[in-house]
Amino acid sequence: MSSNATILIVDDQEALLELSILNLEPRGHKVLTADSVAKALSIISKNKVDLVVTDLRLDDGNGIFLLEEIKNKMTHLDIGVILVTAFSEISKEEVIKKGAIDLLKKPINYDLIDNIAKNLKNHSNSL
């Protein structure tokens, strides 16, 4: 079975989006990017996404709102969500309680994202 996942990276910094593509596509993942909550929700509605990695702070909202939209309004979709931040305005426990897989500090650890994505994809393939 394929372990390649579709990962949506959500961040308002273009350089981070490009870096994410460069780090994750060679590992076999399909990488989609969005620079806002609105674009992320649009992409999720049109694509099968396995994992969303979203910045906590975005120009048109925040990663918590996106997490809540996915977990509360898109319950039919089995999407994992990881929040990333350069700040510490929320605890890991709070985001996990809201349904996130994890809260990671920037810079993004692409090895960890790769492993989580593969585990999610393998889990969904085994259902």
Image (cartoon, grey):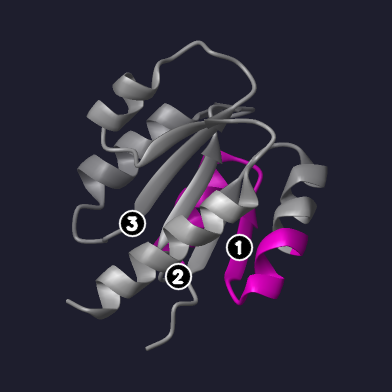
Q: Which residue is mark 2?
A: 47
For badge 2, the amino acid type reads Asn
Q: Quadrant of the C terminus?
A: bottom left
Q: Name the main secondary structure of what is drawn in magenta.
A: helix
The image shows residue 20 at horizontal and vertical percentages of 70, 54
Task: Bin the neighbour count of mark 3 within 10 Å (Cα to Cα): few under 14, some 14-19, many 20 and up.
Answer: many
* Span shown in magenta: 22-46
Task: Bin the neighbour count of mark 2 within 10 Å (Cα to Cα): few under 14, some 14-19, many 20 and up.
Answer: few
For badge 3, the amino acid type reads Ile
Could you tell whether 46 is left or right of 68 in the image? right
Question: Where residue 124 is drawn, which disc sits there?
Answer: none
Pick the residue in front: 21 or 11.
21
Queried whether the magenta region covers residue 34, the answer comes back as yes
* Residue at the (35%, 42%) spot, across then down: 101
Question: Where residue 79 is drawn, which disc sits there?
Answer: 3
Question: Where residue 32 is drawn, which disc sits there?
Answer: 1
**Tag 2, which secondary structure?**
loop
Disc 1 to disc 2, C-alpha distance: 9 Å
Q: Quadrant of the N terminus?
A: bottom left
Pick the residue in front: 69 or 103.
103
Queried whether the magenta region covers residue 65, the answer comes back as no
- Ranked by sequence position, the earlier of labels 2 and 3 is 2
Q: Nearer the viewer, mark 2 or mark 3?
A: 3
Task: Bin the neighbour count of mark 1 within 10 Å (Cα to Cα): few under 14, some 14-19, many 20 and up.
Answer: many
